[in-house]
Amino acid sequence: MKSSEISALSTEELNARIGEEKSNLTKLKFAHAVSAIENPIRIKNVRKEVARLNTELTKRKAASASEQQ
């Protein structure tokens, strides 16, 4: 998902996507622990996707906090 697509999401959609991606990451890690998955780089990509989503969420929280001051 590109950063422009992430910034177009609403805050509720961001929270939902973070939850989905975290559960996906947990499933991938478990599957990799049981037996090696075909493409282990997917774990890294999902982890980075969660980080991107969290960064956007933090950016929005900081912007709303600065507006309230």
Image (cartoon, rainbow, N blue to C red):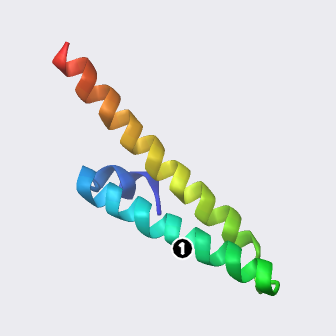
Q: In this picture, is 28 found above or below 16?
A: below
Front residue of 69 and 26: 26
Disc tally is 1
Q: Horizontal placement of 62 versus 10: left or right?
A: right
Residue 51, image x, y percentages: 54, 49
Quarter of the image holding residue 56? Answer: top left
Viewer can see residue 9: yes
Crowding near the residue tagged with mark 1, few <14, some 14–19, many ≥20 C-alpha atoms within 10 Å: some
Residue at 46% from the left image edge and 47% from the top image edge: 54
Q: What residue type is labelled 1?
A: Asn
Q: Horizontal placement of 42 versus 46: left or right?
A: right
Residue at 47% from the left image edge and 63% from the top image edge: 1
Quarter of the image holding residue 12? Answer: bottom left
Q: Horizontal placement of 36 versus 30: left or right?
A: right
Residue at 37% from the left image edge and 58% from the top image edge: 5
Viewer can see residue 10: no
Instruction: Give SS at disc 1.
Output: helix
Residue 66, image x, y percentages: 26, 18
Front residue of 23 and 13: 23
Residue 55, image x, y percentages: 47, 42
Residue to which mark 1 is pinned: 24
Q: In this picture, is 2 found above or below 32?
A: above
Query: Can you name the residue that lies furthest to the left here?
Result: 68
Residue at 45% from the left image edge and 52% from the top image edge: 53
Quarter of the figure with the C terminus: top left
